[in-house]
Amino acid sequence: MAPNLPVAWGGMSTVFTKILDGDLPGRFIYRDETVAAFLSIAPIAYGHTLVVPVEEVDKWTDLSPALWTHMNEIAKEIGQAVIEAFGSERAGYLIAGFEVPHAHIHVFPANDMSGYNLANVIPPEQTDQAKMDEAAELLREKLGTNEAGRR
């Protein structure tokens, strides 16, 4: 089965674009005109956030230098919020990109290397929705954003 490709490539919008457009629900923790961040529905740990460009670009290597820089600035800010909110030793940072053809950075609480294996995620049907809501609120509080991710 071929993946759904973004409209820019003649396919359907990505699942991330559907979240950005409000067609699918998302727990936003940050959003501006070019970048958004929302919780992963299949987290490595509660607080696992995806930093995504609003523009549909499949590979991070195809992002413009300015957009790539901005995504990393936001990922760093979220990483600091993750450490503070969850008391983790570090903020994990991972780029994979095979699961959704839309560039994104994974940022998550990390106390060891287990988070760097996406086979270790909590499946969406097993996530505790109250913990997901709490994680989003903790991160928004640290970032000074509202439920839409806006400052």
Image (cartoon, helix red, strand yellow):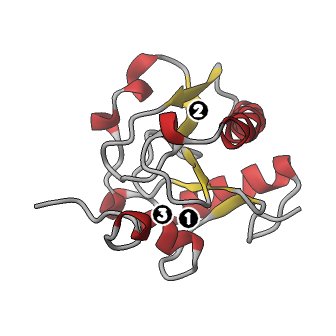
The image shows residue 132 at horizontal and vertical percentages of 55, 59
Callout 1 crowding tier (Cα within 10 Å): few <14, some 14–19, many ≥20: few
Q: Secondary structure at mark 1?
A: helix
Q: CA distance from mark 3 to mark 1?
A: 22 Å
The image shows residue 59 at horizontal and vertical percentages of 44, 41
Of labels 3 and 1, earlier in sequence is: 3
Please identify the quadrant where the C terminus is shown.
bottom right
Q: Which residue is mark 2?
A: 109
Mark 3 against mark 2, which lies toward the viewer?
3
Mark 3 against mark 1, which lies toward the viewer?
3
Q: Residue furthest left?
A: 1
Q: Which residue is mark 1?
A: 130
Nearer the observer, 49 or 128 = 49
Place residue 115 in its image quadrant: top left
Q: CA distance from mark 1 to mark 2?
A: 18 Å
Q: Which residue is mark 3?
A: 16
User: Could you tell me the amino acid type at mark 2?
Assistant: Pro
The image shows residue 32 at horizontal and vertical percentages of 78, 60
Mark 1 against mark 2, which lies toward the viewer?
2
User: Could you tell me the amino acid type at mark 3?
Assistant: Phe
The image shows residue 52 at horizontal and vertical percentages of 58, 51
Circles 3, 1 touching at the beta carbon (< 8 Å)? no
Q: In screen coordinates, is 44 left or right of 151?
A: left
User: Could you tell me the amino acid type at mark 1?
Assistant: Ala
